[in-house]
Image (spheres, helix red, strand yellow):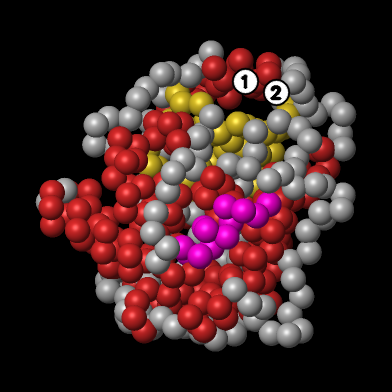
Amino acid sequence: MQSLAKRQRGILQCSRVFLDEFKRRATSLSTSTNSSLFDHSLTGDPDSVVLVEGNASSRTVVLNRPSFLNALNSAVAYRLHKLYKNWEDTPDIGFVVMKGSGSRAFSAGGDIVAIRDFVQKGNMEECKEFFRNLYKFIYILGTYLKPNVAILDGYTMGGAGGISIPGTFRVATDKTVFAIPETLIGYHPDAGASFYISRLPGYLGEYLALTGARLSGVEMVACGLATHYSQSTNVPLIEEHLRNLITDDPSIIETSLSNFSDLHYPNNSSVIRRIEMLDKCFKHDTVEEIMDALENEAAKTNDEWCLSTLKNLKYASPLSLKVTLRSIREGRFQSLDQCLIREYRMTLQGISGQISTDFCEGVRARMVDKDHAPKWDPPSLEHVSKDMVDQYFSPISETEPELDLPTKQREAFT
């Protein structure tokens, strides 16, 4: 009986040791390896935040941070860059598909809450690493030698456009919501946005970049941001078809996607139907002139679109509005690499707080405290000087290196 009691005490002690070790490992796992799955973080385990599915002659990458609408961090950008580079040199892989995990989003763009946290802690190097990794991947995607299919089924915000629109095909759905809302958080459209947004019809790019207005999947196809449109319920069928497709020919992929595409036109309330008025207002050289034109149109017609557009502009950061307009205008005449290099300079200025703390304040008001009452500095357009805008486009310091892109190995398109 005594030996039995000893064995039972020994088993109980071992169980406690095992349980303590299990708890220790579980805690370690949740706070380190997979922290970017469950917390706002710029770091994390690359293998967990981007999953890979092997198919017949393609690979599918899955952005896997569904709790944060698949927001992008350094681990995501690093793994995307590594995977795409490896697959480009693998002859058995004909094309790549990118999609988001969960049912709500392709991606909400960069993890701006995590970026703000790092900025406030003075950890600029982590922020720089994130933007370098992200912008380098965007350049790889924009010069990729194999077809890429991005399935934009859900929210596609900010930097999410950068990791999809430079690719070959973009499939939008009835669940797609696209926007580049950076001026509303005291930032500027980046991740290649000044390249692809500036090439939209008329002055639609200026409108989207300045106001942060949203587009539907139908509107994305109508203006050229997406190449195909399908009902969200068709996405599993599209994915299954692509998994079984053996090809590296873009025309075959195009035909395959077209077989699942639906023909829809923007409704009468769509901004696409207002291009004439939009161009009339957003063609001007300054933000002040754009707002004056909208005020005049609103006074004459009491048009709801003019009024809501003015409301968005008046909410946005005045400094962001001015640097964004200049960025879009410059981007219209620059190649992808030139836009990314300039945007990197702008990004470091925007988050550093040397000119303004609008980025941290904007994220606080919209994403942290959610009071939607940012206190911008400068507080109005008339307080934004030309020197401030010029500094926004300059290197953060004399010793700060420029973004290094492999332009000699991969020629950017214009």
The residue drawn where x is 27% and y is 59% is 293
Label 2 residue SS: helix
The residue drawn where x is 57% and y is 52% is 332
Judge by depth and name the residue closer to the eye, 404 or 285.
285
Residue 352 vertical placement versus 42 (above, below):
below
Residue 321 visible in the displayed image: yes
Judge by depth and name the residue closer to the eye, 176 or 410.
410
Q: Position of residue 161 (x, y in %)?
A: 54, 47
On the image, which quarter does residue 220 sit in? top left
Q: Position of residue 26 (x, y in %)?
A: 61, 61
**1 and 2 marks in contact (CB < 8 Å):** yes
Dot 2 amino acid type = Pro
The residue drawn where x is 74% and y is 71% is 402
| Magenta span contains residue 329 | yes
Residue 352 vertical placement versus 303 (above, below):
below
Instruction: Assess disc 1: are there few (<14), some (14-19) or many (≥20) residues with their C-alpha within 10 Å of its C-alpha.
Output: some
Residue 2 visible in the displayed image: no
CA separation, marks 1 and 2?
A: 6 Å
Residue that label 2 marks: 250
Residue that label 1 marks: 254
Q: Position of residue 256 (x, y in %)?
A: 60, 16
Q: Quadrant of the N terminus?
A: bottom right
Range drawn in magenta: 324-335
Label 1 residue SS: helix
Chief SS of the magenta region:
helix
Q: Position of residue 388 (x, y in %)?
A: 50, 82
